[in-house]
Image: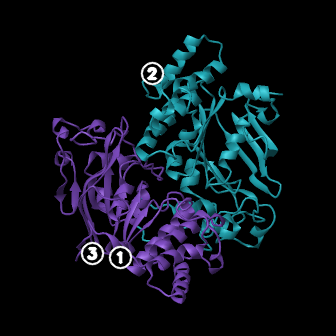
Chain colours: A purple, B cyan
């Protein structure tokens, strides 16, 4: 089956005063229809930039992007507009990603109007359907964002993203700003929408228990590069990259009788501006050797389990 | 004022705090009673707006002058009521006997003052040492939080988020406080940095024998770092006991709901179990138990009147009419 999204060697560099910032550097991955790829990593690792570059919110520096098997890397104009209808995004902060002067109904109607595919009556009908789909009471249709709580605002953001029936949705930290009880409501909603509509998600988050819950596959990013990519269960059972191992050990366990012993990483993230050619994690890695100063390639160590570490076999 | 020998180190009795505007009154803290023993860590958990930070700010008496008032209760530090202390006495206590780590290191530091000087300021305020001695102690504090002393003269913007939070910790610990109020000290940080910072706080706490109140919404952080736990909902403590009691036998429907809403790291579940409904608006709290509109165990008794605090079979406190039904799992 053709994957819904496939990227090859994707790069996104930002020019800064100090040099090129390698926000996304040589990322290759694909996501099958109806599946969720979780993207995890610390702030500044490029996970949000990756999502935004794939859906053409940011212009890529290099690499290829395929949507349903079609090369969309260089499309423009009408074709780009058509492709964007198929690729949507839900933003982290429901407070700043909604227009404060639009009512709930206006926000949801906007993409339907912009597409120019629907008549007025159809738009009204679809907007009402969408509100019901995401669980917003019809009585709230004339409310403004400031009158809604965080969970409802995020539901409005979800309805807006789904208005044009996309194939692929980037969920960029959609529950990070919400309290746990509300977070669970929104996660259940995203999953049930996926079941109903066969949606394909890229779920960007730094919350590891959330990503484990929602994802089929997980990709771990460190300073712009994918260091490990494999099915969700496999990642938590058998993490191979030293960074993934440290990351997973640092999650405080809720089980008081089996606490995690965190492996403390010394040092901080190094700068993604003009990075050295070798492994970007080497400076904090306790296993680093001479070989780690060479550029690292992404290798498939077992079927479906990709790692970017030259010592992964000996450490396994 | 009398100093009682056997009094707990910190004792909060029936604390009530309100925020008010011309139009409305927000009941932020509604009768919170807690104790903290010397050298122990108490976790305060709950959602945004539950009143956790207000409790901590009440202890230091740093609530805003306008718009907030402590309506009642006592906060006793070794038997002495801080709410009756004068402002001059409080100034001696703040930063010296009690200090606070604020949630957001990006805004807690002065952006136009050198980080070292920000640590030296609190030391100078509470000692009569010479300027050189103060500077040396500030440099020692930097080193204690793993920042090279050479960076004394840098500004906050030159530091990463984790380093800034370590500076905030250094300021809080500079005068060896007896009580540390840590308000979401790691919420703004990534997990690997969170692990660094929490380990550092734990090491310093053990070394200096500091008592700590740790405010968080992360059950994992509580599990790893606290001795006792108080679950706060709408300004009231709904469940209170040792970590083992609360984690092994959660009894309040809200606590049980919180545990159910977190994705479990060890079990694959297709659906999470959210708590239905929304946290209440603190300016219009429901009558009776504030949780009753969201509670599947709610009965007529929950809708009005006072809610009793019950002692559960394992000996911890739970503020609920229906603990028997909850423990039997009825009403699910």
Q: Identify the residue at horizontal 71%, vertical 53% (top origin).
A: B235
Q: Identify the residue at horizontal 65%, vertical 69% (top origin).
A: B294
Q: CA distance from mark 1 to mark 2?
A: 57 Å
- Asked which secondary structure carries label 1, the reply is helix
Which label was assigned to residue A243? none
User: Which is more foreground, mark 3 or mark 1?
Assistant: 1
Task: For the residues labelled 1 and 2, say whether their Cβ atoms are less than 8 Å apart.
Answer: no
**Picture quadrant where residue B324 is located:** bottom right
Which label was assigned to residue A82? 1
Q: Position of residue A223 (x, y in %)?
A: 32, 47
Q: Is residue B315 visible?
A: no
Give the mark nearest the N terminus, 3 or 1: 3
| Quadrant for the N terminus of chain B in the image | top right
Q: Is residue A268 left or right of B227 when viewed as pictured?
A: left
Disc 3: which residue: A68
Q: Identify the residue at horizontal 65%, vertical 51% (top origin).
A: B240
Residue A112 vs residue B116, the one in the foreground = A112
| Quadrant for the C terminus of chain B in the image | bottom right
Which label was assigned to residue B149? 2
Residue B321 vs residue A159, the one in the foreground = A159
Q: Position of residue B139 (x, y in %)?
A: 49, 20
- Asked which secondary structure carries label 3, the reply is loop
Q: Chain of mark 2?
A: B
């Amino acid at each position: 089956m053709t994957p819904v999204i496939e990227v090859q060697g994707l790069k996104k560099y930002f020019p800064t005063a100090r040099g090129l910032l390698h926000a996304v550097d040589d990322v290759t991955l694909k996501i099958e229809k109806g599946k969720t790829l979780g993207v995890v990593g610390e702030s500044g690792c490029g996970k949000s930039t990756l999502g935004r570059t794939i859906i053409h919110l940011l212009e890529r520096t290099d690499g290829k992007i395929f949507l349903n098997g079609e090369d969309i890397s260089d499309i423009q104009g009408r074709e780009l507009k058509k492709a964007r209808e198929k690729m949507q995004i839900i933003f982290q902060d429901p407070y700043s990603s909604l227009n404060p002067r639009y009512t709930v109904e206006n926000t949801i109607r906007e993409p339907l109007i912009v597409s120019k595919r629907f008549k007025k009556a159809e738009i009204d009908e679809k907007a009402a359907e969408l509100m019901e789909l995401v669980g917003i009471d019809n009585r709230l249709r004339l409310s403004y964002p400031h009158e809604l709580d965080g969970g409802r605002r995020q539901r409005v953001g979800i309805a807006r993203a789904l208005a044009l029936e996309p194939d692929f949705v980037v969920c960029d930290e959609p529950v990070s700003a919400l309290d746990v009880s509300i977070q669970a409501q929104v996660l259940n909603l995203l999953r049930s929408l996926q079941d109903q509509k066969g949606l394909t998600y890229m779920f960007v988050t730094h919350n590891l228990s959330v990503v484990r819950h929602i994802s089929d596959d997980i990709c771990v990013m460190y300073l712009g590069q994918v260091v490990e990519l494999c099915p969700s269960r496999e990642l938590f059972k058998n993490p191979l990259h030293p960074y993934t191992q440290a990351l997973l050990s640092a999650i405080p366990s809720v089980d008081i009788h089996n606490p995690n012993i965190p492996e403390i990483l010394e040092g901080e993230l190094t700068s993604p501006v003009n990075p050295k050619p070798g492994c970007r994690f080497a400076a904090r890695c306790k296993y680093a050797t001479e070989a780690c100063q060479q550029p690292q390639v992404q290798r498939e160590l077992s079927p479906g389990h990709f790692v970017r570490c030259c010592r992964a076999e000996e450490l396994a | 004022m009398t100093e009682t020998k056997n009094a707990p180190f910190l004792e909060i009795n029936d604390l009530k705090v309100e925020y008010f505007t011309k139009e409305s009154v927000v009941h932020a803290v509604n009768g919170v009673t807690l104790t903290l023993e010397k050298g122990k860590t108490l976790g305060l958990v709950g959602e945004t707006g539950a009143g956790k930070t207000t409790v901590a700010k009440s202890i230091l008496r740093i609530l805003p002058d306008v718009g907030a008032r402590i309506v009642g209760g006592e906060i006793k530090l070794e038997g002495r009521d801080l709410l009756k202390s004068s402002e001059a006495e409080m100034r001696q206590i703040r930063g010296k006997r009690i200090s606070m780590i604020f949630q957001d290191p990006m805004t807690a530091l002065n952006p136009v003052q050198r980080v070292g000087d920000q640590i030296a300021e609190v030391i100078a305020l509470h000692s009569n040492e010479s300027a050189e001695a103060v500077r040396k102690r500030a440099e020692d504090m930097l080193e204690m939080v793993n920042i090279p002393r050479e960076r004394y003269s840098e500004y906050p913007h030159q530091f990463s988020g984790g380093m800034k939070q370590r500076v905030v910790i250094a300021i809080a610990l500079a005068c060896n406080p007896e009580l540390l109020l840590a308000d979401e000290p790691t919420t703004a940080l990534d997990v690997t940095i969170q692990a660094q910072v929490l380990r550092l706080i734990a090491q310093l706490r053990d070394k200096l024998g500091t008592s700590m109140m740790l405010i968080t919404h992360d059950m994992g952080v509580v599990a790893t770092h606290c001795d006792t736990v108080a679950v706060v909902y709408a300004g009231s403590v709904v469940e209170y006991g040792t970590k083992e009691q609360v984690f092994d036998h959660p009894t309040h429907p809200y606590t049980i709901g919180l545990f159910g809403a977190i994705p479990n790291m060890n079990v694959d579940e297709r659906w999470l179990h959210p708590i239905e409904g929304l946290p209440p608006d603190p300016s219009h709290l429901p009558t009776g138990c504030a949780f009753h509109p969201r509670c599947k165990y709610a009965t007529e008794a929950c809708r009005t009147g006072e809610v009793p605090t019950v002692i559960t079979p394992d000996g911890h406190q739970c503020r609920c009419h229906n603990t028997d039904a909850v423990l039997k799992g009825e009403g699910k």
